[in-house]
Image (cartoon, rainbow, N blue to C red):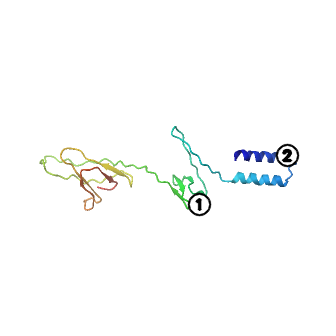
């Protein structure tokens, strides 16, 4: 299409120069074709391998999301996201970037305790993680250490019963 575009433009210039800028029906047809090609939305379907480096930068667009634009991508700088047109509306594509590392915490030392007896440690609020993120819980040590996860500070609402298996804790759980 690019070569046809250049050829039409060149023919228009040549024809106009030869006809002293007279607008013949042929020149008007060429001018209409030139304008049509100039303002037609560009579409591309590209299959490329960027594993060796490089990237794609997606820009902003005022295109209306409809069936014709379905599958289109644009960058929304106000939301800071790449949007996908589903044929009806533009929607931010979700990213799964999450700070799932909790803030450090500690337990009160318990000294001079009898052996072979079960003791409970402090209940600690998990903070420092992004909402919706989880962190893996695992235990190690002598004996049979266990943990439980609660959604209230007094553990009246338990989300994970006493366990030794690997589990997950979310922000604002205890």
> Relative to 41, is 53 above or below?
above
Query: Residue drawn at (31%, 56%), measured in percent from left and top?
Result: 173
Query: Residue drawn at (85%, 50%), measured in percent from left and top?
Result: 21
Q: Secondary structure at mark 1?
A: helix
Residue 2 point in image, percent of width and height: 70, 46
Q: Residues within 10 Å of mark 2 (few under 14, many from 20)?
A: few
Q: Which residue is mark 2?
A: 17
Query: Residue drawn at (76%, 45%), measured in percent from left and top?
Result: 7
The number of discs equals: 2
Which comes sooner in the sequence, label 1 or label 2? 2
In the rendering, which numbered label is found on residue 146? Answer: none
Q: Tell which of 45 and 148 is nearer to you.
A: 45
Residue 127 point in image, percent of width and height: 33, 52
Q: Separation of disc 1 and disc 2 at Cα?
A: 43 Å
In the picture, measured across the screen, residue 108 lies left or right of residue 45, that is left
In the rendering, which numbered label is found on residue 67? Answer: 1
Q: Tell which of 46 and 75 is nearer to you.
A: 46
Nearer the viewer's eye, disc 1 or disc 2?
1
Placement of the C terminus among the 4 image quadrants: bottom left
Query: Residue drawn at (87%, 46%), measured in percent from left and top?
Result: 18
> Relative to 16, is 63 above or below?
below
Q: Secondary structure at mark 2?
A: helix
Residue 136 point in image, percent of width and height: 32, 49
Q: For residue 72, what is the image quadrant? A: bottom right
Residue 160 point in image, percent of width and height: 27, 56
Q: Residues within 10 Å of mark 1 (few under 14, many from 20)?
A: few
Furthest residue in direction left, as rendered? 114
């Amino acid at each position: 299409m690019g070569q046809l575009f250049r050829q039409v433009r060149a023919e228009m210039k040549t024809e106009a120069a030869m006809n002293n800028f007279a607008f013949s029906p042929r020149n008007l047809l060429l001018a209409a074709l030139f304008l049509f090609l100039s303002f037609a939305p560009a579409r591309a379907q590209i299959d490329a391998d960027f594993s060796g480096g490089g990237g794609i930068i997606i820009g902003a667009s005022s295109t209306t999301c409809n069936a014709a634009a379905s599958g289109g991508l644009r960058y929304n700088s106000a939301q800071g996201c790449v949007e996908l047109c589903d044929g009806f509306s533009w929607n931010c594509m979700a990213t799964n970037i999450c700070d799932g590392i909790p803030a450090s915490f500690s337990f009160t030392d318990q000294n001079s305790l009898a052996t072979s007896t079960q003791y409970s440690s402090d209940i600690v609020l998990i903070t420092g993680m992004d909402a919706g993120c989880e962190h893996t819980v695992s235990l190690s040590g002598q004996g049979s250490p266990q943990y439980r996860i609660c959604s209230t500070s007094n553990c009246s609402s338990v989300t994970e019963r006493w366990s030794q298996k690997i589990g997950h804790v979310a922000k604002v759980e205890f």
